[in-house]
Amino acid sequence: MTQQTFSEAHPELTVLRLPLSDPRVRPLVEGLTEEYDRRYGGLFGDASQEMLRYPAEEFEAPHGALLILQEHGRSVAGGAFRRFDADTAELKRIWTHAEHRRRGLARRVLVELEAEAVRRGYRRLYLTTGPRQPEAKNLYLATGYRPGFDLAADPETVKHLSFTKDLP
């Protein structure tokens, strides 16, 4: 039996590298804002303010990138990175539309972001996720990211779950 790559198994998906201002990015921003509000309420402050925390230019070349996966012209997943330091990119805004979860799309976003970070000369990735996103934590652990926190600790006491990964 021949094993298919993700792209072969999902030819209907298109990867777009876009600026934050592009309307095709709006579902990512709106979806994340709703998700953060639902999961965290005011625990970390206003979710809308969090989405505006970084200037849009930080997610643009040469130091950053933002990508969207589209299926039949609809944005279904996406993510971004920005410069953390000379060797490290910080992953931000990894998102999958609620109707499209459990299909491997977040993993595909990670693969695309990692490849783009390598093309931009980064040697390492860094990210944080919140304690109320166990599926994100599990995704990062399953894809080779090293936790920067005690995995046995109550995530609510850790607050920001940090991860790193060395790039090839």
Image: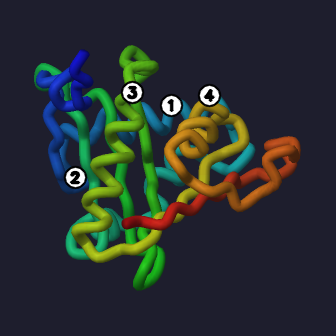
* Viewer-side label of 1, 3: 3
Mark 1 Cα shell of 10 Å, populated few (<14), some (14-19), many (≥20): some
Q: Where is residue 162 in the image (x, y as percent from the top left)?
A: 65, 58
Q: Indicate the amino acid at tag 4.
A: Arg
Identify the image quadrant of the N terminus: top left
Residue corresponding to mark 1: 34
- Residue drawn at x 35%, y 56% is 114
Q: Indicate the amino acid at tag 1.
A: Glu
Q: Disc 4 and disc 2: Cα gap in Å?
A: 24 Å
* Viewer-side label of 3, 4: 3
Q: Indicate the amino acid at tag 2.
A: Ser
- Cβ–Cβ below 8 Å for labels 1 and 4? yes
Considering only order in the chain, which callout, 3 or 2, is on the residue closer to the N terminus? Answer: 2
Residue corresponding to mark 4: 38
Q: Indicate the amino acid at tag 3.
A: Gly
For label 3, the SS is: loop
**Along the horizontal axis of the image, is 81 left or right of 126?**
left
Looking at the image, which is closer to me, 157 or 119?
Answer: 119
Looking at the image, which is closer to me, 60 or 56?
Answer: 60
Considering only order in the chain, which callout, 2 or 4, is on the residue closer to the N terminus? Answer: 2
For label 1, the SS is: helix
Considering only order in the chain, which callout, 1 or 2, is on the residue closer to the N terminus? Answer: 2
Tell me: residue 95, above or below residue 85.
above
Q: Disc 3 and disc 4: Cα gap in Å?
A: 23 Å
Q: Of the numbered discs in the image, which one, if any, rests on residue 83?
A: none
- Asked which colour scheme the image uses, the reply is rainbow
Considering only order in the chain, which callout, 3 or 1, is on the residue closer to the N terminus? Answer: 1
